[in-house]
């Protein structure tokens, strides 16, 4: 039977204000597998995003989530652990939103409500990528285009979902499938202790830190990230 029929499906979950373009090279690399991009719009809770993913995903699948996508991935495996064959948590953490983060999110949401959504990507760009990529026009265009595609209303819903997400740390030890935790060495949004915290709590996990990388590992170092995920899928 052809591999394209039997290969394990991979479900990708984008981050805040991101689309499937976040995983462009990875999707191309895994083209022999069924690929699903989870829908993260039109829902304002992480639980609802996870429930919708499970309603549209195959019975069993590999799961990749980056940043907000990682929050959804952790909720998916909490709701239906038997359906996730392997898990990739990228540039994410298991904690609920800290007060300073929530305060910043509310400020960005207020800018959006006042018609300033078009400014948000530019305001955030230098914080989410490695300093060496600040002048990378091609990368910047991808980030800005994804934000435009998501739009202000969905952005507000996603931020609300992130603010109200639950602390998943008590559930980490129950994860028994093969898990890869990917971190950017210079990720300004996810401190390294958050990645180590998940790695120590998930018995079947491996931690991989990508050098010279910020928060968007799949776009900043797409080939390296694809190799890491390919190894994870083959493990």
Image: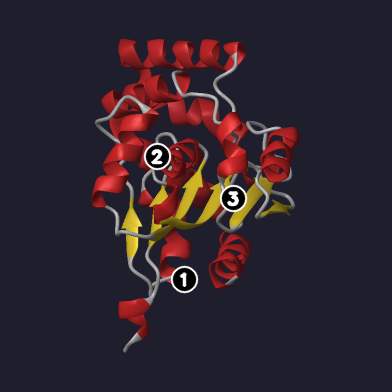
Q: Is 105 rendered above or below residue 231? A: above
Name the side, left or right, on which 173 lies relative to 158: right
Q: Are marks 2 and 3 in contact (CB under 8 Å)?
A: no
Tell me the distance, in whole angstroms, between the alpha carbons under discs 1 and 2: 29 Å
Colour mapping used in the image: secondary structure
Give the distance between the C-alpha atoms of the residues marked 3 and 1, in whole angstroms: 15 Å
Establish if 229 lies above or below 63.
Answer: below
Residue found at x 56% / y 60%: 222
Q: Which residue is mark 1?
A: 29
Q: Does any portion of residue 84 appear in the rendered image?
A: yes
Q: What residue is pinned by disc 3?
A: 217
Q: Nearer the viewer, residue 48 or 85?
A: 85
Q: Secondary structure at mark 2?
A: helix
The spot of residue 139 in percent (x, y) is 51, 49
Name which of mark 2 and mark 3 comes first in the sequence: 2
10 Å crowding of disc 2: few (<14), some (14-19), many (20+): some
**Mark before the other along the chain sequence, 1 or 2:** 1
Residue at mark 2? 79
Q: Measuring 29% from the left and 31% from the top, which residue is drawn there?
A: 151
The kind of secondary structure element at disc 1 is: helix
**Residue drawn at 42 percent across, 44 percent down:** 14
Q: Secondary structure at mark 3?
A: helix
Is residue 92 visible to the viewer in this orientation of the structure? no
Instruction: Please provide percent x and percent y for residue 224.
Output: 63, 63
Counting from the top left corner in percent of width and height, residue 50 is at 35, 39
> Considering depth in this image, is 87 or 123 the residue closer to the camera?
87
Could you tell me how far apart the alpha carbons at marks 2 and 3 are, in whole angstroms? 27 Å
Q: Quadrant of the C terminus?
A: bottom right
The spot of residue 209 in percent (x, y) is 72, 51
From the viewer's perspective, tell me whether residue 30 is left or right of residue 150: right
């Amino acid at each position: 039977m052809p591999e394209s029929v039997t290969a394990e499906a991979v479900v990708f979950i984008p981050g805040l204000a991101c689309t499937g373009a976040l995983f462009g090279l990875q999707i191309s690399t895994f083209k022999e597998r069924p690929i699903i991009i989870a829908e993260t719009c039109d829902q304002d809770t992480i639980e609802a995003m996870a429930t919708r993913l499970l309603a549209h995903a195959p019975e069993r699948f590999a799961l990749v989530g980056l940043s907000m996508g990682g929050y959804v991935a952790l909720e998916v495996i909490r709701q239906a652990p038997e359906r996730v064959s392997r898990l990739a948590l990228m540039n994410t953490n298991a904690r609920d939103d800290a007060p300073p983060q929530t305060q910043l999110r509310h400020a960005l949401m207020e800018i959006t409500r006042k018609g300033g959504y078009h400014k948000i990507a530019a305001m955030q760009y230098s914080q989410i990528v490695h300093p060496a990529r600040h002048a990378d026009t091609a990368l910047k265009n991808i980030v800005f285009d994804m934000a435009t595609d998501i739009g202000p209303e969905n952005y507000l819903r996603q931020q609300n979902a992130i603010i109200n997400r639950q602390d998943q740390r008590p559930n980490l030890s129950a994860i028994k499938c093969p898990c890869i935790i990917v971190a950017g060495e210079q990720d300004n949004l996810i401190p390294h202790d958050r990645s180590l915290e998940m790695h120590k709590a998930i018995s079947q996990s491996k931690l991989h830190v990508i050098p010279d990388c910020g928060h968007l590992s799949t776009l900043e170092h797409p080939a390296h990230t694809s190799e890491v995920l390919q190894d994870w899928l083959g493990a």
